[in-house]
Image: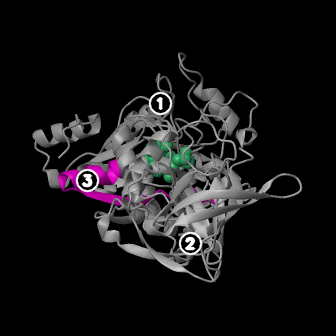
Amino acid sequence: MSEEPKHFIAQIVEADIANGLPPSHVHTRFPPEPNGCLHIGHAKAICLDFGTAMQYGGKCNLRFDDTNPTKEDTRFVDAIQEDIKWLGFDWNGGMYYASDYFEKLYSLAEELILNGKAYVCTLSSEEFKEYRGVPGEPGKPSPHRDRPVQESLDLFRRMRAGEFEEGQYVLRAKIDMASPNMHMRDPAIYRIKKDFHHRTGNAWCIYPMYDFAHCLSDAIEGITHSLCTLEFDVHRPLYDWFVENTSIIKTLEIQPRQYEFARLNLTYTMMSKRKLQQLVEEKVVDDWDDPRMPTIAGMRRRGYTAKAIRAFCEDIGITKFNSLTDFALLEYHLRQDLNKTALRRMAVFDPIEVEIENWQEGETDWLDAVNNPEDESAGSRKIPFSKHIFIERDDFMENPPNKYFRLKPNGEVRLRYAYLLTCKDVIKNEKGEIVKIIGVIDRASRGGNAPDGRKVKGTIHWVDASNCVKADAMIYDKLFTKADMGDLAEGEDFKDYLNPQSLVKKTMYAEPSVKELKPGIPVQFERVAYFMADSKSFKDGVLAFNRTVTLKDSFSK
Ligand code: ATP
Ligand code: MG
Ligand code: MG
């Protein structure tokens, strides 16, 4: 058990338990709208919603909040389930759709009309706003506010029957046109929308508004703690009003309550689904799972692990204050996990050839290399060594400064898992550029150390030029150049801040065993970065790797 102080949501739940709520009755829900793929912000909500239920032995539902037919798609319903499972959570309370409750919600709306608590209003949307007024001054009642119950009921039924055009009528709750909370000034609860719905098809042409549907869906499912982001705090009185002013209240053992927490904002990251959708539609990125996207699918494809994302969510905690979290903190948790789990392999990205003078042409030595120095159970593999090898161009300097421990003329360096190598000569082209290094190895140093115990400080990676494989490396960087993407000046477009260098494709030369790697297996190309085989292009002999994250931490904890 962690000794960290409990966040305020946990404190609320525990106070409820102290007041008699059986822990197993703690019931939360995660309510995504299936209009896009989940992003890292949703991961925070998922960890909180599912995590809270798990912590107390309660239940968490997955509910698709599909009350807006225009933007929703079955594709996202499937993708969302996959992402939640991948993150390591399970909807032990069941999976539901708000659209399953359309009939029930409709009957509760009729009930409000019959009780004089809702009316059909004919104001245009401009008039609606004008009558609602401004904060600090009471609004004006709609001329239809006192429409007789039977007339509203008849109009509402005809709205459902499809007799009217979109925007012609809305059903409004009759609450308080003078309320200081604008959301309480007779909010719309049903509107006409003649769109195809991904599940109910054309069965409905009126759809409930979020404020009406969400709280009542919670009540229908027996949710106890309905956790949402801070901007909904002004909606809370409405949440309670609908529950308390419909007959649903009589069926409840425990009244659901809404609690708000700060959403996750990350530096250099755009989190609005609408804007992410735009990037997909305009082909700025490959798709929702482009490895540069902050989506769970994109991060998974890039090589992020579920464990790292959960550790990050745990670390940022749950508060009531909006803030901007440093992306480097997420990368810190990612490196913590990858350092322990990633297989080590060798690949050279900017090769220069080294010819080994004292090695036979055609002679190959197969050396042992450990798969993960952090995990003995990962075993080892064989890597080939022959007369021609590649090292990184910048691991050699002809005129090095003091304390340069990599390869230099007459200097000695360790070839990782192989031999000690001394540079004897360089071969240059007519422009004076080095095209080849001539070296000798100490055969007695096989495995990496000389029997005489002489100290060789530098160790570099390399690959066998005759037996290596070529692969594509996708080097990713931030998608945006601005740290606070939530703080755009008026008239600025978020796409003004796209990073033109967010993807650079390179060719790399890797040891042959990388052919056996697969999407889902993290790998560290030693001294370079963490990578993962790309789930879309790594197949049929095509080797392609996504750079997950660099090795170096820019974050200090
Ligand atoms: P977006 O604005 O990105 O479209 P949304 O809130 O409309 O997000 P939903 O599908 O409705 O997306 O979100 C499902 C749940 O995830 C909600 O409870 C919402 O509060 C939560 N959520 C969404 N974005 C974040 C975020 N950045 N941080 C924490 N929770 C979030
Ligand atoms: Mg939403
Ligand atoms: Mg949204």
In front here: 370 or 56?
370
Residue 499: within the magenta? Answer: no
Residue name at image x 35 percent, y 41 percent: 315
> In the image, is residue 418 above or below residue 487?
below
- The crowding category of the residue bearing disc 1, from other C-alpha atoms within 10 Å (few below 14, some 14 to 19, many at least 20), is few
| Residue 363 image offset from top left, x and y in percent | 58, 82
- Is residue 268 at all visible to an observer of this figure? yes
In the rendered structure, which segment of residues is drawn in magenta? 46-72
User: What is the secondary structure assignment of the residue under circle 3?
Assistant: helix
Q: Amino acid at mark 2?
A: Glu
Q: Amino acid at mark 3?
A: Ala
| 196 horizontally vs 113: left or right | right
For the residues labelled 2 and 3, say whether their Cβ atoms are less than 8 Å apart: no
The answer for how far apart the CA atoms under marks 1 and 3 are is: 26 Å
- The crowding category of the residue bearing disc 3, from other C-alpha atoms within 10 Å (few below 14, some 14 to 19, many at least 20), is many
User: What is the secondary structure assignment of the residue under circle 2?
Assistant: loop
Nearer the N terminus, badge 1 or badge 3?
Answer: 3
In front here: 270 or 35?
270
Which colour assignment does the render follow?
A: one colour
Q: Which residue is mark 1?
A: 323
The answer for how far apart the CA atoms under marks 2 and 3 are is: 46 Å
- The crowding category of the residue bearing disc 2, from other C-alpha atoms within 10 Å (few below 14, some 14 to 19, many at least 20), is many
